[in-house]
Amino acid sequence: MSGFKVGIVRLGRAAGKTKYALLDEHDIALVQQYAFEARVDVDPDGNGAKIYAWAYDINRGRASGHFVHELLWEKHCGGIAPGWKVMHKNGITVDNRLENLSLVPSNRNCVPIEEVPSKNRETSLYWVAIQQLPTDPIQEQHYPECLYNRFYNANGEVVEEDDDTNVYYECHYPPCSSMEKELREFSICGRCQEVRYCGSYCQQKDWPIHKKHCRERKRPYVTERPPDR
Ligand SMILES: [Zn+2]
Ligand SMILES: [Zn+2]
């Protein structure tokens, strides 16, 4: 990381994890004017959900909100014409360094140009940067605020849920940013019934840390009501 500086903004809880946004160092001053939060956008075409950084002007309120990648594009590169959108080259939708952003026709599918292979998640810039934080980002995931999830419905309104019926999960292994494409797609930890993983690779890698927090769920986890007789 020598000779290379990146700003990190805490976005808060989304999709079962604490998320952060990466910004170029010179864009970090935006935090003086904007409040940042994580926004989970559910694709209306059924391609799951993605976590984005969202920011609104502190003096103008939440209605003034923008996606951070659009805000930054407009600040540095000019307007976004109708029919175009800003995408994240490496597929990490909270990595808003200008060099990771690219303007593409909006009908282009969101397949990242250089997606991080699953076995290289630990070396992704996002994870390398997050690990520089003074607080342990893994421990922080167990603060009580994780009891609710904020997301946005199709009208862009904030909805806060105290259950997870409509929540898409990101893989719990901190370096992994795989996101469910369907509700309940990822397998749940059988012991605590709280955290979800995209696959056995991430579950095994996360276990040495997760086992310190994993508590066996006392009452049986009922997903369906038994049939009436
Ligand atoms: Zn994973
Ligand atoms: Zn567990």
Image: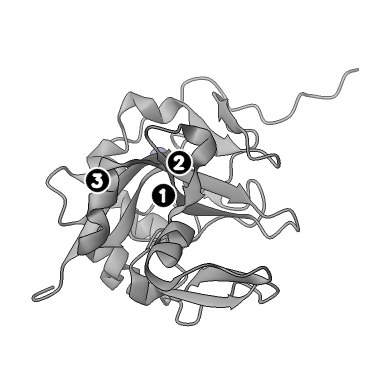
Residue type pointed to by label 3: Pro
Q: Which residue is mark 2?
A: 16
- Give the quadrant of the C terminus: top right
Q: Residue at x 46, y 31 (%)?
A: 61
Against 197, is 113 above or below?
A: below
Secondary structure category for the residue under label 1: loop
Determine crowd level at label 3: few under 14, some 14-19, many 20+ residues with C-alpha closer than 10 A: some
Residue type pointed to by label 1: His
Secondary structure category for the residue under label 3: helix
Residue 88 x, y percent position in the rendering:
47, 70
The quadrant where ligand 2 appears is top left
**Direction bottom: furthest residue:** 113
Tell me whether the residue at label 2 lies in contact with that at label 1, contact meaning CB atoms closer than 8 angstroms.
yes
Q: Which mark is residue 137?
A: 3
Q: Which residue is mark 1?
A: 172
Q: Which circle's residue, 2 or 1, is located before the other in the chain?
A: 2
Q: Which circle's residue, 3 or 2, is located before the other in the chain?
A: 2
Q: Residue at x 56, y 68 (%)?
A: 80
Per the model, the C-alpha gap separating discs 3 and 2 is 13 Å
Q: Quadrant of residue 55?
A: top left
**Ligand 1: does it lie within 8 Å of the C-beta at label 1?**
yes
